[in-house]
Image (tube, rainbow, N blue to C red):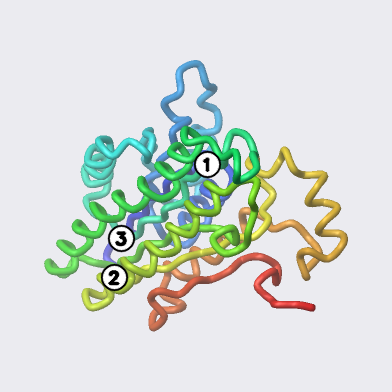
Amino acid sequence: MDRRPAALVTGAGRGIGRAIALDLARNGYDIAANDITFEEPGRPAAHQAELDQSVRGFGAGFLAVPGDIADLGGHESLLEAVRKRFGRLDLLVNNAGVAPLERRDILDTDPGSFDRVMNVNARGAFFLTQRAARWMLEQARDGRAQGPAVIFISSISAEVSSPSRAEYCLSKAAASAAARLFADRLAAAGIHVYEVRPGIIQTDMTAGVRDKYDRLISEGLVPQRRWGRPEDVARAVTALARGDFAFSTGLCLEVSGGMNIRRL
């Protein structure tokens, strides 16, 4: 490659997104890191500075792009910031996501919570991909593309039922469908689209149910008998991004310790 390809990772401030950004930087990508926490007033900037330093430690360029993916009006300025800094976009990782603020029985799902979760996890990712894909198509026509790809980070909740967080399950099922749709539309142009489907991953999002899942994992819910780590997901993203599955656009790669195995 003449120069490092550029990746935009949403929700890169912590957890899975941070691990993805670091692993991509380690494997040759410049990183544009988006996170809503980068613009929260009064919030310590230490996590952003640490990510910046770590990414640059791999010889990669770094750009922090604050913003809420649910705000469709901010997508143009987000991508323009990437264009101005790196001049290109080779990989979009739709990782930003939220869980319900409160788990409720599906019969009591709150419309406000439903809209919040869907707007980030499904609607925001869909329309950001739409804009990014147009740019990638432009690069492909000009011969500037370097293995262009889009990766949606979904969840086993796209298929596994959790009636106490219905809006989350629906949002991830929508993200899964979006990955297939964009894969179909962009395949002929050489732009690969994938879905990475994490299982039970140890992050801030799952901290509140740590005891519950410690017990369930010990009882065999996860065949590999451990929590997933953000780095497990990151390595899957990197493998897809660098072309290890170049003839498999539309692939859903589950990172769940074997929860995809149907068992009696």
Mark carried by residue 215: none
Q: At 31% across and 66% down in the image, what residue appears? A: 182
Q: Is residue 112 above or below residue 40?
A: below
Mark carried by residue 90: 3
When asked about the image quadrant of residue 207, the answer is top right
* Quadrant in which the N terminus is drawn: bottom left
Q: Earlier in the sequence, mark 2 or mark 3?
A: 3
When asked about the image quadrant of residue 152, the answer is bottom left
Q: Is residue 224 left or right of residue 249?
A: right
Q: Extreme top residue here?
A: 42
Q: Name the secondary structure under disc 1.
A: loop
Q: Is residue 241 above or below residue 71?
A: below
In space, the residues marked 1 and 3 are separated at their CA atoms by 25 Å
Q: Earlier in the sequence, mark 2 or mark 1?
A: 1
Label 1 sits on residue: 98
Q: At 76% across and 65% down in the image, what residue appears? A: 222
Label 2 sits on residue: 191
